Amino acid sequence: MAFPDPSLTMPQGTPPKPRSNGRLARLVASPRFQRWAARTPIVRRFARREGEALFDLLAGFCHTQALTALIELDVLSYLAEAPATVEGLSRCCRVPPDRMRILLRAGDAIGLLRLSRGCYRLTARGAALTGVPGLAGMIRHNAILYRDLADPAAFFRGEGETEMAGFWPYVFGAGAAADPETAERYSQVMAESQTLVADEVLSAVSLSGVRHLMDVGGGTGVFLDAVGAAYPDLKRTLFDLPPVIAAAQRRFSDGDVTLAAGSFRDDPLPEGADAVSLVRILFDHSDDTVRALLARVHAALPAGGRVIVAEPMGRDAKAARPADAYFALYTLAMGTGRTRTVEEVGALLAEAGFKQVAAPRVQRAFVTRVVIAQKSS
Ligand SMILES: C[S@@+](CC[C@H](N)C(=O)[O-])C[C@H]1O[C@@H](n2cnc3c(N)ncnc32)[C@H](O)[C@@H]1O
């Protein structure tokens, strides 16, 4: 194998810095050290754990594909009804029994199923998966991302088009002229997973004292629906692109929510709300678009008005799997936005003129994190 041209792998003119842990890394990488670690009582457990963790990284794609097959073939749905034998599932799902047995054992190995008295049944984790709103849809939707990642080196080099970038053309190109069917398909994917996000946001942030909330880029209104259930007296406005607002009309036909169609890239935001939520919006967009949007949000709010940003975010101090090893790749495949850290979002809010930037604690950071801020009184 040829060595890569160093000018391609190192930024030009930047000499490699000696790493303080370089010697340790070389030691741990040496086969002699690894053989010693496997034999030596104190370090043996650590070495085994590290070995298993490495194997899990290697096998992660197979785990995901087994999970996807269990969903695509409706195995989990059948088992949610009743325990079943290999033969029974093989017939229902039209998979040969010897192959079904392998899939079910894989499902057992990844903790979703267990075999008891000749029948497979769901574990608590498997049952939870079937009950989490939007999760099965998200697992199916992942197929697009994983096709984009099929050649990971080319993906990170930015070679070629991604399928993910074409999934919502109306958002980044066609705008108001987009066809409602495409808008509806994308909005459906978002709506399915919104329930979880809404639960998380509403348990992290209190809206008491808010009179009127505007959800900017609120899709078909699932978040505002949850807000209405928790705060029945709150006035609500939904702002989104025209084809999405057309789809939202069905949910809010009673006129409970004011529907405002427009583009936050081109139009000023409606005034009158004393709080604005941006749920899973900023990470779809470049820093320039986010700066312009936050300036519009700031202009639309009265003094003392609040802004709530909710989406997957990392932390500056420590990379984390949901934000840095999943959503960052997802947004890269979309090709327009990027996953930011809580600190980066806070800095963008401060730059837009917001004060009292804070990140309330969330229970499930893999669902969303939240950053809030206020316009000076
Ligand atoms: C990732 S989705 C999030 C939807 C919803 N907030 C949620 O969390 O389910 C992004 C939303 O932003 C909307 N959007 C994108 N560009 C927009 C623009 N220029 N003006 C208004 N809304 C826009 C999309 O139509 C979509 O509903």
Image: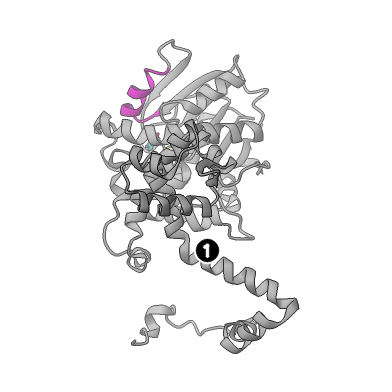
- Measured from the top left, where is residue 202 in percent x and y? 62, 31
Q: Quadrant of residue 359?
A: top right
**Which amino acid, mark 1?**
Asp
State which quarter of the image contains the N terminus. Answer: bottom left
Query: Measuring 68% from the left and 72% from the top, which residue is drawn there?
Result: 46
Query: Measuring 51% from the left and 28% from the top, which residue is drawn there?
Result: 223
- Measured from the top left, where is residue 24 in percent x and y? 64, 83
Residue placed furthest toward the front = 117
Is 353 positioned to the left or the right of 256 in the image? right
Above or below: residue 286 compared with residue 94: below
Is 197 positioned to the left or the right of 44 in the image? left
- Measured from the top left, where is residue 92 in percent x and y? 35, 37
Q: Quadrant of residue 167?
A: top left
Q: Confirm whether the magenta stretch covers residue 246.
A: yes
Query: Measuring 37% from the left and 33% from the top, which residue is drawn there?
Result: 187
Residue marked by disc 1: 56
Q: Quadrant of residue 172?
A: top left
Is 323 positioned to the left or the right of 138 in the image? right
Magenta stretch bounds: 240-251
